């Protein structure tokens, strides 16, 4: 019997309210718990833990840091759902959906703190 349930990425964010708005309003996650500078969000079987950095503490450097890859069954269905909200983001913050030569169809979304969230669906590899 398996003992592992899921991986839940932990992200440090500069402004918790801004990050929560992004995850809930743009990506459709639900806040399951929030206290102080900490929040847990989920959507189906995927969760994120967000921790607001103390005032004056900088977010680690590096724009477009890769943080999470979420495997989905139907990427185009997810994209259709999210598109009206993704269209409110800067154009450079959304990439895809696009078929990759390594056998994934991907949608990449840049969060407000430079964290890159990837959604991917397995497809046949390009020949």
Image (cartoon, rainbow, N blue to C red):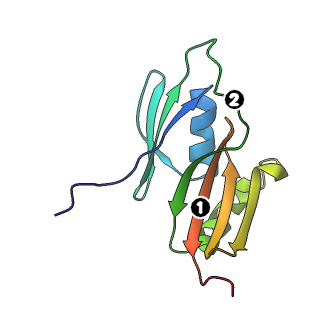
Farthest residue to the bottom: give it: 127
First along the sequence among labels 2 and 1? 2
Locate residue 118 relative to residue 43 in the image: left or right: right
Question: Residue 93: image x %, image y %?
Answer: 77, 49
Where residue 105 sits, quadrant-wise, is bottom right
SS of the residue at dot 2?
loop
Residue at (75% x, 55% y) in the render: 94
Q: CA distance from mark 2 to mark 1?
A: 23 Å
Residues 110 and 101: in front is 101
Q: Residues within 10 Å of mark 2 (few under 14, many from 20)?
A: few
Locate residue 53 relative to residue 26 in the image: left or right: left
Farthest residue to the right: give it: 91
Instruction: Give residue 16's mark.
Output: none
Indicate whether 104 appears above or below 54: below
Farthest residue to the left: give it: 1
Residue at (72% x, 55% y) in the render: 86
Locate residue 102 relative to residue 6 in the image: left or right: right
Residues 32 and 15: in front is 15
Instruction: Give residue 119's mark.
Output: 1
Tell me the quarter of the image containing the C terminus.
bottom right
Residue at (55% x, 15% y) in the render: 54
SS of the residue at dot 1?
strand
Question: Residue 119: image x %, image y %?
Answer: 59, 61
Tell me the quarter of the image containing the N terminus.
bottom left
Residues 101 and 84: in front is 101
Locate residue 70 relative to residue 105 in the image: left or right: left
Question: Residue 81: image x %, image y %?
Answer: 63, 65
Question: Residue 98: image x %, image y %?
Answer: 72, 71
Q: Are marks 2 and 1 in contact (CB under 8 Å)?
A: no
Farthest residue to the top: give it: 56
Q: Which residue is mark 2?
A: 61
């Amino acid at each position: 019997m398996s003992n592992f349930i899921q991986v839940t990425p932990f992200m440090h964010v500069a402004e918790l309210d801004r990050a929560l708005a992004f995850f809930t309003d743009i990506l459709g996650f639900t806040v399951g718990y929030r206290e102080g500078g900490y929040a847990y969000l989920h959507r189906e079987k995927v969760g994120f833990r967000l921790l607001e950095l103390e005032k004056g503490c900088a977010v680690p450097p590096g724009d477009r840091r890769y943080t999470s890859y979420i495997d989905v069954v139907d990427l185009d269905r997810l994209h259709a759902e999210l598109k009206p909200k993704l269209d409110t983001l800067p154009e450079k913050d959304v990439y895809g959906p696009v078929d990759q030569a390594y056998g994934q169809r991907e949608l990449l979304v840049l969060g407000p703190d430079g964290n890159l969230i990837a959604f991917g669906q397995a497809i046949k590899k390009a020949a």
